Amino acid sequence: MPCCNVSSPLIAQLLLALHADAKTGQPEGPGYGETLLIALLAHLRQTHTAAASETQPEGLLSKVALERVKEHIRGRLESGVSLGALAALLDMDSYAFLRAFKRSTGVTPHQYLIRARIEHAKQMLHLTRLPVTDIALRCGFASPSHFADTFKKVERRTALEYRNCCAV
């Protein structure tokens, strides 16, 4: 019995199976041992390397890249940001970035920006007594009426109704 002082039951079982296969002269054929070894290496790569956490299904942004883009958007709520600038942040072309962002989040970058602006406005409505018109402009909306329309569409109530409902 090999001494394999490991905490993972899967790794221990794979090592034991490899040892038994080698000790008995590979009765299942050489492919069995190779399959066990590939399974062991795949498990080790998946659980014990940084590269595994960076790999993403095709067409999705990595968690790090997605968080970088989201933080960039949140930092520019007032001024907004172009699709080209977001794509350049990840060294991607605009079309590929747009598809990857939408697959990763379920919304387009523009929709994400609008939602982030509304969330920021909700915080300001809750935490400050600033007039709604000031909040609209500080959150990057082109006009108070654009803010009012968008807020009502997203929240299904006006900004004043939200403020009155959520006042502390």
Image (cartoon, grey):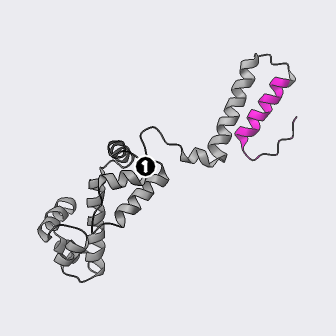
Q: Residue at x 36, y 54 (%)?
A: 86
Secondary structure mostly seen in magenta is helix
Give coordinates of residue 37: x percent, y percent.
72, 30
Query: In the rendered image, which quarter contains the N terminus?
Result: top right
Disc 1 is placed on an element classified as loop
Residue 21 in magenta stretch = yes
Three-letter code for the amino acid on which mark 1 is drawn: Asp
Q: Residue at x 27, y 71 (%)?
A: 122
Give the number of marks. 1
Q: Quadrant of residue 18?
A: top right
Q: Is residue 95 visible?
A: yes
Q: Is residue 129 above or below residue 43?
A: below
Q: Is residue 157 visible?
A: no
Give coordinates of residue 156: x percent, y percent.
18, 62
Q: Is residue 115 above or below residue 24?
A: below
Q: Is residue 144 left or right of residue 31?
A: left
Give coordinates of residue 119: x percent, y percent.
30, 66
How crowded pointer 1 is (Cα within 10 Å; few <14, some 14-19, many 20+) is rated as few
Q: Residue at x 14, y 69 (%)?
A: 143
Q: Is residue 40 left or right of residue 85?
A: right
Looking at the image, which is closer to me, 42 or 163? 42
Residue farthest along the bottom direction in this orientation: 129
Query: In the rendered image, which quarter contains the C terminus?
Result: bottom left
Q: Is residue 166 above or below residue 80?
A: below
Looking at the image, which is closer to me, 90 or 49? 90
Looking at the image, which is closer to me, 23 or 147? 147
Q: Residue at x 34, y 42 (%)?
A: 99
Q: Which residue is mark 1?
A: 91
Residue 91 in magenta stretch = no
Write down the region rendered in magenta.
1-22
Q: Is residue 23 above or below residue 29?
A: below
